[in-house]
């Protein structure tokens, strides 16, 4: 049998088995919170003017900021194939150093503390 045909059949078989198992495996008794339209912890039928913690949004924005570094650093493994890979690694190191300094600043300012 051809190697390409074998690989295609094997991947199709594994994908089919995983798709079938995913229908039978999950727990089929969701609770009230999972059935509600919002899973953020707020009552969706209550008042929309209730105050909520600003600290939650600060931590969420910090997570998004530091999560974007992954998008900036994803092409880094292919940087060694460029004509000047040293320049690519220097820029990546500068991005990581800047983000590390930002993280240290937020840590020292107490921005990462969940409770006061």
Image (tube, rainbow, N blue to C red):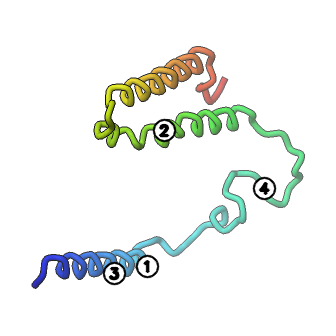
Residue 50, horizontal then vertical, whole percent: 86, 44
Q: Give the CA distance from mark 3 to mark 4.
A: 39 Å
Q: Give the CA distance from mark 1 to mark 4.
A: 30 Å
* Within-10-Å neighbours for mark 1: few <14, some 14–19, many 20+: few
Image quarter hosting the C terminus: top right
Q: Is residue 68 left or right of residue 24?
A: right
Label disc, if present, on residue 74 of the rendered structure: none
Q: Are marks 3 and 4 in contact (CB under 8 Å)?
A: no
> Where does label 4 land, which residue?
43
Question: Which residue is found at the position 37% from the left and 38% from the top?
Answer: 76
Q: Give the CA distance from mark 2 to mark 4.
A: 37 Å
Q: Nearer the viewer, mark 3 or mark 2?
A: 2
The image quarter in which residue 77 lies? top left
Q: Are marks 1 and 3 in contact (CB under 8 Å)?
A: no
Question: Which residue is found at the position 39% from the left and 24% from the top?
Answer: 90
> Where does label 1 land, which residue?
23
Q: Is residue 44 above or below residue 93?
A: below
Secondary structure under the numbered disc 1 in the rendered image: helix
């Amino acid at each position: 049998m051809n190697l390409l045909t074998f690989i295609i059949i094997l991947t199709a078989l594994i994908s089919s088995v995983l798709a079938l198992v995913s229908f039978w495996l999950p727990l089929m008794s969701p609770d009230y919170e999972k059935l509600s339209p919002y899973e953020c912890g707020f009552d969706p039928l209550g008042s929309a003017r209730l105050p909520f913690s600003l600290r939650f949004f600060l931590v969420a924005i910090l997570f998004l900021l530091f999560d974007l570094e992954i998008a900036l650093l994803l092409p880094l493994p292919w940087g060694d194939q460029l004509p000047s890979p040293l320049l690519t690694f220097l820029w990546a190191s500068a991005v990581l150093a800047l983000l590390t300094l930002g993280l240290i600043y937020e840590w020292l300012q107490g921005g990462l503390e969940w409770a006061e």
